[in-house]
Image (spheres, rainbow, N blue to C red):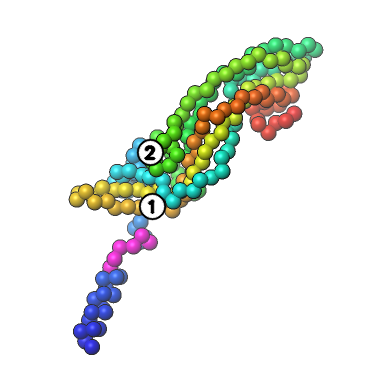
Amino acid sequence: MLTSAFLMLSLLGHTLSAPTLLSRDNPSDTDLLLSCPGAAGSPNIKRADKCTLVNIVNNPDTTLQYNVGNVQGNCEGGTNPVMLTIGGQTTTSTTTTASANVGISFEGINIGGGLSSADTKSSTQSNSTMITIAPGRQSVMTMGVLAHSQSGNVQVNFGSRVDDHFIWFTGAVITQTVPTDQITFDVHETVCGTNALDFNNHS
């Protein structure tokens, strides 16, 4: 009986001493993300070997809206329509957001494993056309870009002196939105004196 009791206490002590991811000493999501390759680094933890999007969920496709070039208007009080050229160029790029305020910019941070690992992260598009603008109206070219989106947690791998890894996961959910090459150009016309760059302006 004494031997059995000693064995049970030994096993219990071993279980209680095992590390747990719920420790108060866990690195914060901010520290974990700052340790990723390409990030600014954290003063609290060392640099990670790599960061990978895991537990991936594919979100519905969305259309990203951009204004292309400057607004052109027939707003000088005349009574005749005018012919003007609208358009220019704009750059589309992958965007990364977090479900919680982690207090960092994701610009330059390398998080692999998702769509952004395989797709182009930025591209420049240009287009122009000549249109007729009626008196009291203004126009700007717009561009709609089909985008794929994925969400997940970030797995952060740290190297050790024995080539082993300590692995952590962010609690915050990260969403990456990646533009495709499916692009549609259009003209957004509004009343002079209103905000022509507002996509919700239907005046």
Q: Which residues are magenta?
A: 17-22
Question: What residue type is disc 1 on?
Answer: Phe
The Cα atoms of the two marked residues, 1 and 2, are separated by: 15 Å
**Marking on residue 169:** 1
Q: Relative to 46, does residue 145 appear above or below in the rendering?
A: above
Question: What residue type is disc 2 on?
Answer: Asn
**Can you give x and y, in whole percent of width and height, for residue 67 in the image?**
60, 26
Q: Secondary structure at mark 1?
A: strand
Magenta segment, principal secondary structure?
A: loop
On screen, residue 106 versus residue 14, left or right, reads right
Q: Relative to 124, does residue 175 appear above or below in the rendering?
A: below
Residue bearing mark 2 = 110
Q: Nearer the viewer, residue 40 or 152?
A: 152
**Can you give x and y, in whole percent of width and height, for residue 38 in the image?**
35, 37
Q: Nearer the viewer, residue 137 or 123?
A: 123
| Quarter of the rendering containing residue 86 | top right
